[in-house]
Image: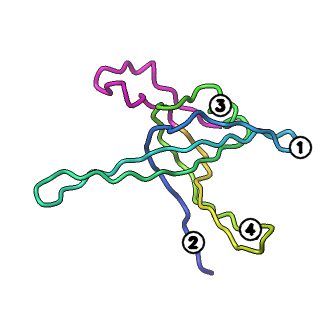
Amino acid sequence: MLSNMNSVIIEGNLVEDPEIKTTPNGTAVCQFAIASNRYYKANNDTEKETSFLSVETWAKLAENCASFLKKGKGVRVVGRIKQDRWVDQHGKHNSRVKIVADHIDFMPGKKQNIETKKEEDKHDIVF
């Protein structure tokens, strides 16, 4: 039997405030997007590559994300990649890739200096 691994850890800053909804059966689902930067050297210059990623959380983690996260806040996301596929009303096939998070670390925002951040200000949320 073939075993597949689907796991991701990524850090970034929220590019918008989270949006929370409730499923028909009452389960909270929270969605937000993060920008994650990668820096690398090219011809003795430092280059920056930014990726924008959609993140989805569920249940109590979703409620906590909606309560504590705001645009600009830094997060470390641990989860898995999920691809949604659908056919629209015109018959066009669509897909979207997102991260479904199992764990979120609340980190300093982009305007805070990590070296001066107090440890008690960091929140580790796991549900």
Query: Which residue is pictured at 57% across the width and 71% down the height?
Result: 4
Dot 3 falls on a residue whose secondary structure is: helix
Q: With 112 as the anchor, is 29 left or right in this view?
A: right
Q: Earlier in the sequence, mark 3 or mark 4?
A: 3
Dot 1 falls on a residue whose secondary structure is: loop
Identify the mark at residue 118; answer none if there is no mark. Answer: none
Query: Which residue is pictured at 58% across the width and 53% down the height?
Result: 99
> Depth-wise, is mark 4 or mark 1 nearer the camera?
4
Q: Going by the picture, which residue comes out furthest to the bottom? A: 1
In three-dimensional space, the C-alpha distance between marks 2 and 1, rounded to whole angstroms, equals 31 Å
Dot 2 falls on a residue whose secondary structure is: loop
Q: Going by the picture, which residue comes out furthest to the right? A: 25
Q: Which residues are magenta?
A: 105-127
The kind of residue tagged 2 is Asn
Q: Going by the picture, which residue comes out furthest to the front? A: 90
The kind of residue tagged 1 is Asn
Query: Which residue is pictured at 67% across the width and 68% down the height?
Result: 94
Considering the image in quadrants, where does the N terminus appear? bottom right
**Are dots 4 and 2 in contact, CB under 8 Å?**
no
Q: Which residue is mark 3?
A: 66
In three-dimensional space, the C-alpha distance between marks 4 and 1, rounded to whole angstroms, equals 22 Å
In three-dimensional space, the C-alpha distance between marks 4 and 2, rounded to whole angstroms, equals 24 Å
Q: Which residue is mark 1?
A: 25
Identify the mark at residue 86; answer none if there is no mark. Answer: 4
Q: Which residue is mark 2?
A: 4
